[in-house]
Image: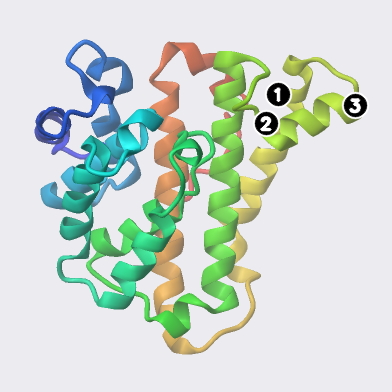
């Protein structure tokens, strides 16, 4: 984990209080610890980039009441958008805003697309994928695979914590219904499936469609960034006792080193 952790944690707590976001009140900051997540999923980032990433993660957590126009989340987004777009092109900024443009209900952390988090990989790496290359099958294949894996991993942890409910992923629900099995049995099945998907992701650069040298120049760093997210998210979840049982199911997950 990044050595900037303590500074990032202090910054995000102050940032959340500045904008009145309820997710990181002092009495829950140690439980949520989004700074630790940012420092794990962007391990090579500098302090400014980690503060941005940690604040963005904090931005995901408030309930729908914070989304009213002019409310705390609206004001926080103005700040995040300005900081994220500094040094990036207008095309990148438009893409980042589009990826973040979801309804308040869809911002539940278990349902949110990870594409904005993957956009921040470019900020951390101080590079930018040109629009024509971003649209290629090679780049999109990496993004789709990473997004799918992380969405299913979050579904597992949500079900482990809350049982079957409105945040239960469609795959888990389908397994329960089609196989007429219990939630623990469905969790075992889905965890094995996710682990297999992660192993395929580990070797996917060798199997993606051939692309130009320019595309390949961006695909490798992006794959590394997405792999850091997978590994870092699992490490972060293993640090929370309530997720320990589910985390054991990923013991065979690849290291991506």
Disc 1, SS: helix
Residue 187 circle label = 1
Query: Could you tell me how far apart the alpha carbons at marks 1 and 2 are, in whole angstroms?
Result: 6 Å
Residue located 74% across and 17% down the image? 183
* Identity of the residue furthest to the front in this view: 69
Colouring convention used in this rendered image of the protein: rainbow
Disc 3, SS: loop
Residue located 55% across and 24% down the image? 157
Does label 2 or label 3 sit earlier along the sequence? 3
Instruction: Give neighbour class at mark 2: few <14, some 14-19, many 20+ (Cα, 10 Å).
Output: many
Residue located 26% across and 39% down the image? 73
Residue 191 circle label = 2
Looking at the picture, how far across and down is residue 8, in whole percent? 14, 36
Instruction: Give neighbour class at mark 3: few <14, some 14-19, many 20+ (Cα, 10 Å).
Output: few
Q: Are marks 1 and 2 in contact (CB under 8 Å)?
A: yes
Does label 1 or label 3 sit earlier along the sequence? 3
- Residue sitting nearer the eye, 34 or 208: 34
Looking at the picture, how far across and down is residue 38, in whole percent? 29, 40
Query: Could you tell me how far apart the alpha carbons at marks 1 and 3 are, in whole angstroms?
Result: 12 Å
- Residue sitting nearer the eye, 155 or 206: 155
Number of numbered discs present? 3
Looking at the picture, how far across and down is residue 256, in whole percent? 48, 50
Residue located 27% across and 46% down the image? 43
Residue 179 circle label = 3
């Amino acid at each position: 984990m990044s050595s900037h952790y303590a500074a990032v944690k202090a910054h995000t707590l102050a940032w959340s209080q500045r904008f009145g976001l309820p997710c990181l009140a002092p009495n829950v900051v140690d439980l949520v610890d989004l700074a630790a997540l940012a420092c794990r999923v962007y391990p090579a980032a500098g302090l400014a980039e980690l503060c941005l990433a940690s604040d963005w993660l904090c931005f995901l957590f408030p309930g729908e009441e914070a989304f009213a126009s002019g409310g705390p989340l609206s004001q926080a987004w103005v700040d995040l958008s300005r900081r994220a777009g500094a040094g990036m092109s207008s095309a990148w900024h438009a893409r980042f805003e589009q990826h973040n443009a979801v309804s308040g209900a869809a911002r539940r952390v278990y349902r949110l697309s990870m594409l904005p988090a993957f956009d921040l990989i470019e900020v951390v790496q101080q590079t930018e994928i040109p629009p024509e290359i971003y649209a290629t099958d090679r780049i999109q294949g990496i993004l789709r695979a990473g997004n799918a894996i992380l969405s299913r991993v979050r579904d597992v942890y949500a079900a482990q914590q809350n049982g079957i409910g409105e945040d239960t992923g469609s795959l888990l629900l389908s397994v329960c219904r089609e196989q007429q099995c219990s939630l623990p049995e469905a969790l075992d099945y889905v965890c094995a499936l996710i682990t297999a998907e992660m192993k395929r992701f580990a070797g996917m650069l060798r199997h993606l469609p051939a692309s130009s040298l320019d595309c390949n120049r961006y695909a490798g760093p992006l794959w590394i960034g997405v792999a850091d997210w997978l590994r870092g998210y699992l490490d972060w979840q293993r640090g929370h006792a309530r997720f320990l049982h589910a985390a054991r199911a990923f013991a065979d997950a690849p290291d991506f080193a």
